[in-house]
Amino acid sequence: MGKRRKKYKRVVKREAKLPTVFQCPRCGAKTLSVRFEKTDTPGFKKAVISCGSCGLYAEYPQPVPEIWEPVDVYAKFIDLYLEGKITVETRKPEKGSEVGEGQQVSEGES
Ligand SMILES: [Zn+2]
């Protein structure tokens, strides 16, 4: 007796989606995001960490390898942050226009 079994191959698509939003070490909100920017160094990129809630802003002190994911940067950032080894600024995210922070160079007013 041959029992024919239909082979159901269930392919569960597992989206390997790594988190890109993390918990902010300063305000505790889960709005900390890591952004990458190009650098002049091939194979490396610049990592910028910012929080949408409290305005925390930090740039990773050195270029990170291109293969790094946001989660890698976040882990390192937390270490540096807790050790006070990274410069953290506050940039209020609520800024309607891009204009404003313009550097006003006063041309020698005398
Ligand atoms: Zn924050």
Image (cartoon, rainbow, N blue to C red):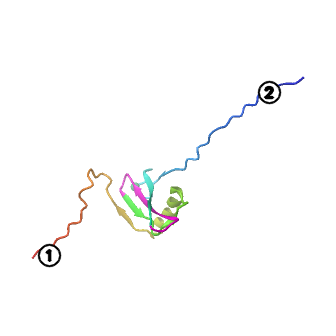
Residue located 53% across and 61% down the image: 66
Question: Of 27 and 1, which appears nearest the observer?
Answer: 1
Label 1 – label 2 distance at C-alpha:
88 Å
Query: Residue 18, image x and y in percent?
Result: 55, 50
Give the magenta part as a residue range. Answer: 40-55
Residue 48 shown in magenta: yes
Q: Specify few, some or many for label 2: CA neighbours under 10 Å numbering under 14, 14-19, or 20 or more.
A: few
Pointer 2 residue Cβ closer than 8 Å to ligand 1: no
Q: Which amino acid does label 2 sit on?
A: Arg
Q: Name the residue under label 2.
A: 5
Q: Where's the C terminus, which quadrant?
A: bottom left
> Mark 1: which secondary structure?
loop
Residue at image point 43% right, 54% down:
32
Residue 26 visible? The answer is no
| Residue at (40, 55) in percent of width and height | 51
Residue 11 against residue 32 in the figure, above or below: above
Viewer-nearest residue: 99 or 90: 99
Query: Which circle marks residue 108 in the picture?
Result: 1
Instruction: Say whether residue 90 is left or right of residue 5.
Output: left
Residue 98 location (% of width, % of height): 27, 55
Can residue 4 be seen in the rendering of this structure? yes
